[in-house]
Image: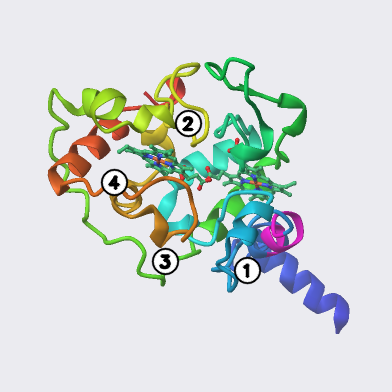
Amino acid sequence: MRSLSVVLFALLAGIGMVDTAMAAGGADVLQQQCSSCHALTKPADASLDRLWERKGPDLYYAGVKFNREWLEAWLQNPTTIRPGGVMYAKVVKASADKTADTIDASKLTAHIKLNKADAGAAADALMKLGTDLDLVQKGAFKNGAPGPMAKMLFSKLRGCSSCHSAKEGSGGQSGPELADAGSRLQPDFMVAYINNPQKFDPHIWMPTLGLTDADVQKLTGYLITLKTAEAK
Ligand code: HEC
Ligand code: HEC
């Protein structure tokens, strides 16, 4: 009897009627290999201490934040997104004359790499997180042209580049790099985040800037054009 069910399982798996163990394991991969550093559900403790102590950025809203293809590729070949780590204040060394802060790279470690199957499964599981939370409004990005002033808004007028770089090696280092924001992030998420970063974490140090919707649309329109070389 037992051998019969084994044969039957192998047969069904072979013709794709049941998921193979690997493909079904995305949620397990997250629990076992990721939850020590990343919040996978909304933290009950929303204190500044929690933010200070976290070892990686929150993933509890990954499903409304990331593009799936980017996740699958990045998890196999992770690159630096936050030049100053997840908590900039812990790795920055102020220069004596205070003009140029530098990053203490010895405090940063390389990210875990997944094989293709695990990366795909983890990406699928991540895309389910936060879709029920009402953090991001569908259709918030109106898809208009960014307009000629958008880049200027980012780099000069609205001060985004004091914390974010839109090009490798330029711009601030205390926020995530946005040089491939168009590949990495969903447009509606960018609108929601730029409008109200504290909705995602009450203590995150990106300020709520009180921008007009027109400015937020232009900024998001500009960020969407920033893509990795491979994705262009
Ligand atoms: C030792 C702690 C640690 C573990 C374990 C870990 N991560 Fe990370 N993760 C980080 C840090 C730190 C960053 C920020 C890297 C950066 O911004 O350059 C990060 C970034 C990420 C990002 C990009 C987040 C963003 O907001 O841009 C994703 C996605 C991610 N991790 C997924 C995973 C998955 C999936 C696993 C499990 C397979 C995992 N991580 C395991 C520490 C960890
Ligand atoms: C004082 C520094 C600061 C300024 C100024 C700032 N940001 Fe941020 N920004 C951050 C930090 C910190 C995060 C969140 C990092 C995290 O979750 O680890 C963030 C996150 C984001 C994200 C989400 C990306 C991600 O990977 O989580 C977007 C999009 C963004 N900022 C756009 C902007 C734009 C557009 C402006 C200008 C209007 C701006 N920011 C101004 C610090 C800043």
The kind of secondary structure element at disc 2 is loop
* Residue 196 sits inside the magenta stretch: no
CB of mark 2 near ligand 1 (< 8 Å): no
Mark 3 surroundings: few (<14), some (14-19) or many (≥20) residues within 10 A: some
Q: Quadrant of residue 217?
A: top left
Residues at marks 2 and 4, CA–CA distance in whole angstroms: 19 Å
The kind of secondary structure element at disc 3 is loop
Check residue 18 in the rendering and tell me which mark sits there, or answer none: 1
Residues at marks 2 and 3, CA–CA distance in whole angstroms: 24 Å
Give yes or no for contact between labels 2 and 3 (Cβ–Cβ under 8 Å).
no
Q: Which residue matches tag 3?
A: 131
As drawn, 27 above or below 92: below
Asked whether 50 or 218 is in front, the reply is 50
Q: Which residue matches tag 4?
A: 209
Q: Is residue 199 left or right of residue 142?
A: right
Q: What residue lies at 45% left-to-right and 17% top-to-bottom?
A: 170
Asked whether 186 or 220 is in front, the reply is 220
CB of mark 3 near ligand 1 (< 8 Å): no
- Residue 99 percent coordinates (x, y): 52, 16
Q: Which residue matches tag 2?
A: 177
Mark 4 surroundings: few (<14), some (14-19) or many (≥20) residues within 10 A: few
The kind of secondary structure element at disc 4 is loop
Identified by mark 3, the residue type is: Thr
> Which marked residue is nearer to the observer: mark 2 or mark 3?
2
The magenta-colored residue range is 28-35
CB of mark 4 near ligand 2 (< 8 Å): yes
As drawn, 44 above or below 151: below
Give yes or no for contact between labels 3 and 1 (Cβ–Cβ under 8 Å).
no
The kind of secondary structure element at disc 1 is loop
